Amino acid sequence: MIPPIFPLCVASPAVLLAFGEAPTRVYPFGLIEKPPALPYAVWQTVGGSPENYLAQRPDVDALTTQVDVYAKNETSLIQGATALRDAFEPCGYITRWGSQMLDPETKLLRLSFDVDWLVPR
């Protein structure tokens, strides 16, 4: 039900370098500090389903998460997104590279991508 995003983040020296250690600024949507220190990333599960079988209960959940990285400059944005990509790829699959844009709400640079996970129960 929950992808291993935060454990992978705190185990990655590159993610800790990009997003800090206390706190590590990788937040589930809705649980972000106000105002957040920069750069930061937010994530949310945007889809998924259990792997159903006829003879037994599901033993794995397939999930898709959207990850958005926010920063004031392109260097921090790319460093953060690269660190997250490298932390997630051993356990998940990047399935979409979204746009890089100036977010109209936050006035920060934003890079978005999706990760698919198979999470054992």
Image (cartoon, helix red, strand yellow):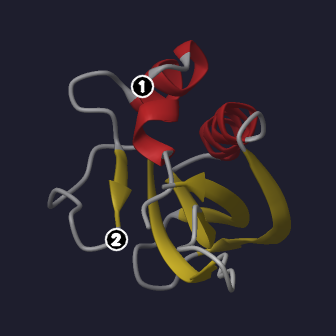
Instruction: Tell me if residue 38 can be seen.
Output: yes
Query: Residue 88: percent from the left, percent from the top?
Result: 68, 41
Residue drawn 54% across the image and 13% down it: 13
Query: Residue 114: horizontal and vertical position, in percent?
Result: 71, 67
Residue 8 in the image: x percent, y percent? 52, 32
At label 2, which amino acid type do we have?
Phe
User: How far across and down, in percent of the image, does residue 119 sit?
Assistant: 58, 55
Between 103 and 51, the one lying in front of the other is: 51
Name the quadrant of the N terminus.
bottom left
Residue drawn at (68%, 80%) of the image: 53
Judge from the rendering whether residue 91 lies leftward or rightward of residue 49; answer left or right. Answer: right
* Residue at the extreme top: 13
Q: Quadrant of residue 23?
A: top left
Query: Would residue 39 be seen by someone viewing this image from the given angle?
Result: no
Q: Residue at x 50, y 75 (%)?
A: 45
- Answer whether labels 1 and 2 touch (C-beta < 8 Å): no
The residue beneath circle 1 is: 10
Point out the tag, 1 or 2, that comes first from the N-terminus. 1
Q: State the SS at label 2.
A: loop
Residue 29: give its label. Answer: 2
* Residue found at the very far front of the displayed protein: 55
Vertically, is 35 above or below 19?
below
- Helix, strand or loop for disc 1: helix
